[in-house]
Image: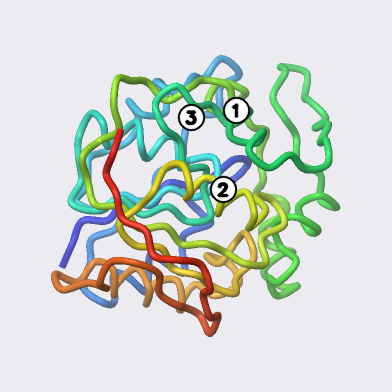
Amino acid sequence: MSDILLIHGAWHGGWCWQATAEALRSAGHRVACPDLPDDPGTTLADCVTALPAAAIILGHSMSGILAEALAQQRPPRLLIHLCSYLPLPGDSLARLDRLHPGPARAWPRDDEGRLVMSADAACDMLYQDVPEKIVARALPRLRPQPLGPMRDPLPGPARADVTRHYLLCEHDRAIAPALQRAMLDRAPVDQAHATDWGHSPFLSDPQGLARLIDRIAAPQGPACGWTSAARHSASSPARRSRSS
């Protein structure tokens, strides 16, 4: 049994983890999935302050940076990145995006300057492999995203000295698999898992995601290197490092 913190990505809330959290609790884990603050002036530091400590921290998408910042302050036993940004100290989301530039995205903003995700963009980038009934329930719950957590860099001077796992999603349309691999090349982890999910496995395959987290959380978790998960075969080389 482990205390697991699930940190949602941009535009979402703790609600997105409901099915995954229920499956993890059924496996005996204690799970927290709080809402991140969404006031217009919210900063990366504000988000980290709002999060509890946990033995296992998982950050999705944007919240890879939040997970790393929290680990610097309150190191977990395991740090799991789910198709997330994987920063070194000094990195922001914009800097990491330049590792593998994709088409420019111009997000609309609300009256308070927060970024807005349209239903069409969410369906195309985030939910292309999610059942329609679940998408219909998710879209009304998306909320404007403050700029601060996306703009602010990971503080220094060094990465937290923790064991890291990365769940690479091969069908991700929000953070391209090529960008995920580019981040892994410069910020290696102890174990990478290649999967055939899109960007939102907590909605498309929550049971499968929970099984993988449970397997990683086990005292004798997967060996170092690359593994295949969720039916997809990995072809990239193994890598292991905790260098700063």
Q: For the N terminus, which image quadrant?
A: bottom left
* Disc 3 and disc 2 in contact, CB within 8 angstroms: no
In the image, residue 119 lies at what x, y percent? 81, 51
Q: Which residue is drawn at 20% across and 39% down?
A: 75
In the image, residue 152 lies at what x, y percent? 51, 20
Residue 87 appears left or right of 113: left
Q: Foreground residue, 11 or 151?
A: 151
SS for dot 3: loop
Using the image, determine if residue 1 lies above or below residue 42.
below
Compare marks 3 and 2 and give the one earlier in the sequence: 3
Q: As shown in the figure, which amino acid type bears the numbered disc 1?
A: Arg
Q: As shown in the figure, which amino acid type bears the numbered disc 3?
A: Pro
The residue beneath circle 1 is 95
From the viewer's perspective, is the residue at label 3 or at label 2 nearer? Answer: 2
Using the image, determine if residue 164 lies above or below residue 171.
above
Using the image, determine if residue 87 lies above or below residue 41.
below
Q: Residue at x 37, y 20 (%)?
A: 155
Mark 3, residues whose alpha carbon is within 10 Å: few (<14), some, or many (≥20)? some
SS for dot 1: helix
From the viewer's perspective, is the residue at label 1 or at label 3 nearer? Answer: 1
Q: Foreground residue, 2 or 155?
A: 155
Q: As shown in the figure, which amino acid type bears the numbered disc 2?
A: Ala
Distance from Cα at disc 2 to Cα at disc 1: 12 Å
Q: For the C terminus, which image quadrant?
A: top left
Distance from Cα at disc 1 to Cα at disc 3: 23 Å
The residue beneath circle 2 is 182
Compare marks 1 and 3 and give the one earlier in the sequence: 3
Q: Residue at x 72, y 18 (%)?
A: 113
Q: In which quarter of the image is residue 69?
A: top left
Q: Which residue lies furthest to the front in this view?
A: 237
The residue beneath circle 3 is 37
